[in-house]
Every structure is written in C-alpha cells, then in structure tokens.
Image (tube, rainbow, N blue to C red):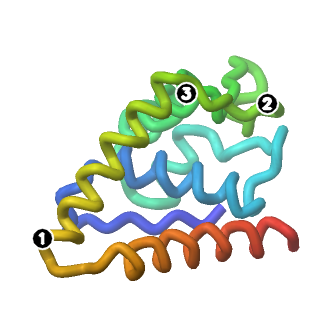
Amino acid sequence: MFIKIDFETEMPIYEQLKRQIIEGIAKGALKKGEQLPSVRQLAEDIGINLHTVNKAYNILKNEGFLTIDRRKGAMVSNLMPEITEQYLELLKEELKYLISNSYCRGMRKEGFLSICESIYDEIDDEKKF
C-alpha cells in the first residue's frame, strides 16, 4: 500500500491517511477483505506515530470501511458503508464549502462540474483494472 503524507499541510496526518485508504479502496488498489499493515508497521513505514495510524484505522472502522480483528488486524470491509441521510448531509456541507471557495475564486459552474466528472471518471476507470 502506497501512502504519501504531506507534513507541511494543515490537514491532520490521520485525516490524510484516512482519505488515502478510502481512495485506495475506491480505485481498487485495496480489495475487499485485504489485510492492511499493522498499526505499528504502517507507522514505521511512513514515519508517523502509531497512535495516528490507530486513530485513522478506528475512524475507518467506525465509518464501515475497515474491520478490525485482534488476531488478524485491520482489513478492508467486505461490505462498504451505505449512503445515509447523515452521509448526505456531510457531503452537502463539504461540497458547499468547496463550491463557495471555487466560486469566490471565479470558477464557473461548468468548470467545477468538469473537474468533478474528471475525478469520478478517473476513479471509475482505475477500478476496472
């Protein structure tokens, strides 16, 4: 599993890790049922605190992306989380911020939607392979 952490950004490391694991699942780089490195091993591999990895893994478990077994460790869940009202509200809030930020910078609706479509297609295309 390839994880790249940007230590210069304001985004917390656990959030970067969480997002990259979800992206890996979406693109098919991480398969359902696949075992992830142990907390200790991943922390050592990318040079971060093991509590940071543990936090990311636990959030992903709570969101339904991972299962954690004391003997087997963390694995990609066989059942992905469903779209809930709570998720849709979170999605709307995140998009509201991104759209507002883009709008203030002068981006037009068509440009924003084009970027969204391009990213969606990129994930969809990678998933097929």
CA gap between label 2 and label 3 equals 11 Å
The amino acid beneath tag 2 is Leu
| Amino acid residing under circle 3 | Glu
Amino acid type indicated by mark 1: Cys
- The image position of residue 9, as x and y in percent, is 21, 65
**Marks 1 and 2: CB-CB under 8 Å?**
no
Quadrant housing the C terminus: bottom right
Looking at the picture, how far across and down is residue 126, in whole percent? 75, 73
| Quadrant of the drawing holding the N terminus | bottom right
> Which residue shows up at 46% across the image and 23% down it?
86
Foreground tag (1 vs 3): 1
Q: Nearer the viewer, residue 23 or 44?
A: 23
Q: Secondary structure at mark 2?
A: loop
Judge by depth and name the residue closer to the eye, 91 or 28.
91
Looking at the rendered structure, which numbered label has been put on residue 104? 1
Q: Which mark is residue 79?
A: 2
The residue beneath circle 3 is 63
Q: Is residue 81 left or right of residue 20?
A: right
Q: Is residue 37 left or right of residue 112?
A: right
First along the sequence among labels 2 and 3: 3
Task: Report which quarter residue 52 is drawn in.
Answer: top left
Figure check: 10 above or below 111: above
